[in-house]
Amino acid sequence: MDRYYLGIDNGGTMSKAALFNQKGEEIAVAVRDVKCFLVPNGGNERDANLMWEKTIAAIREVIESSKVSAEQIKAVACTGHGNGLYLVDEAGNPVRKAINSTDGRAQKYISEWIENGVDKKALPLTAQSLWAAQPNALLAWLRDNEPETLEKARWILMAKDYVRLKLTGEVYAEISDMSGTSLMNVVTGEYDDEVLKIFGLEEFREMLPPLIGSAEQAGEITSEVAKLTGLKAGTPVAGGMFDIDACGLASGIVDEAQMSMVVGTWGNNQYIAREPLIDEDLFMTSKYSIPGWYLMLEGSPTSASNLDWFIINFLLAEKEQKGSDFFPWLNEQVESISADESDVVFLPFLFGCNEKNPVASGFQNIKGEHTRTHLLRAVYEGIVFSHKHHIERLMNFRDKPDVIRCTGGATQSNVWMQMFADAIGIPMEVPAGTQLGALGAAMAASVCAEEYADFAEAVKNMTSIERRFEPNPINCDIYQSKYLKYKELIGRLTK
């Protein structure tokens, strides 16, 4: 009898469920939009209860459409966006709207910590930069602005830990996710009172849940959830993982040879190593899902969320009119203008930045002859250049990889993937499948259920490469020239 594994992925804007067989082949996928709310002072939130309802609906659709019996689904695991903040009470119910990983309300605390040298004190323990949507800054903000919320809260959770709690009724914090929050000691892989003391957050120690590994069993599907979803009560649920880990595993990243890139709401660029890298010029080091390995990451919210903004504000009518043909049409529009035809520059800093103190974002160098299509191509290129900037920073710490494995919505565009290969000058490979975050989670489920002995074996059996893009030398030169102009412009717009 065939065996199947369910991966659940709650990212920046969507709730997804996908069912895979033991070969990693997608059997069924369901996706639900999750509405986010912009609030004053840079806030970005979502209704966690609604996210759970959307997740239930996605799971139910996958099971119904797959025609796979619940008994054949041997385990479940979740992944999701890291950071932000999901606060729940003793019963596991949200005490306020969840805070997303693109939230900026707590920037004042980051600025103060950096000014006072707190970041340098924390770095040897946390191994990461500080930024406004991390839970440490958000807890400080809530303490000063919503003390009544914290009085109701019992547990500090990440997105996928909240979903897993709803599936099982069990409270855990999975280690790859929690290691990206600046709330624990990344080197030791444990909570550390000294870390909380550095940030003045000692009072929140009892709100940190027990830690668990990605492939460890963290509970089982409850009878209530079984009725809501069609899953079998008692089905094991694994710890799951941070979405950057899930995409890394789905890309086949099990050693230092490759790098991984996620072109999604956040632009994440990463590699793994046996030893943690601690350096003030690196964005973040966290614990990888494979025990004994660390993940080094350069990332920022400067990726495909900028394209989403452009579509909503300038192409919504076309999107509604063309339906499933919209993105192929979009790629045709981009391809209709050659790489050297336009000098419009797009700075993809609408939701955050990976440069120091820029005073501008969006389009620069617009002239009267430029059309909406020129602007669209500039958005594609600006996002590519942001990733290139992160890759260059990673190259300060390691050798050039043989290949970069790419995941995220942008991988559906061959035009965009070729642009990445040409601009970065490294071959790009795209793994098979459409829901690679969910596939990474399903791998954790497969190891938890003892389908495979470890993640290396799961990757060997469940991943494959579908497409490869070789750099075009002529376009490499064109994009290098455009990238230098992009960097020069940022330099002029930096205070």
Image (tube, helix red, strand yellow):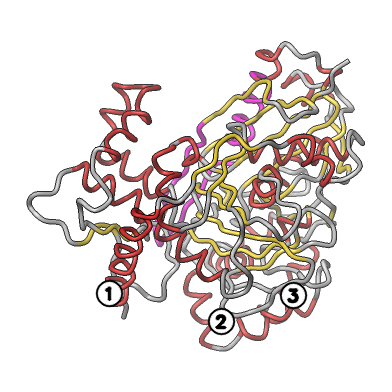
Q: Secondary structure at mark 3?
A: helix
Please state if 259 lies on the left or on the right of 112 as rendered. Answer: right
Mark 1 vs mark 3: in front: 1
Q: Secondary structure at mark 2?
A: helix
Packing grade of label 2 (10 A; few <14, some 14-19, many >=20) is: some
Disc 1/disc 3 C-alpha distance (Å): 39 Å
Sooner in the amino-acid sequence: mark 2 or mark 1: 2
Instruction: Tell me the quarter of the image containing the N terminus.
Output: top right
Mark 2 vs mark 1: in front: 1
Q: On the image, numbered disc 1 is attached to which residue? A: 493
**Furthest-top residue in this view:** 67
Disc 2/disc 1 C-alpha distance (Å): 25 Å
Q: On the image, numbered disc 3 is attached to which residue? A: 202
Front residue (pair 472, 263): 472
Whether residue 35 is in magenta: the answer is yes
Disc 3/disc 2 C-alpha distance (Å): 16 Å
Please state if 100 lies on the left or on the right of 8 as rendered. Answer: left
Front residue (pair 103, 292): 292
Front residue (pair 162, 175): 175
Q: Quadrant of residue 56?
A: top right
Q: Is residue 481 above or below residue 473?
A: below
Q: Is residue 183 above or below residue 317?
A: below
Packing grade of label 3 (10 A; few <14, some 14-19, many >=20) is: few
Q: On the image, numbered disc 2 is attached to which residue? A: 113
Residue depicted at 77% across the width and 41% down the height:
459
Dot 2 amino acid type: Trp
Q: Are marks 3 and 2 in contact (CB under 8 Å)?
A: no
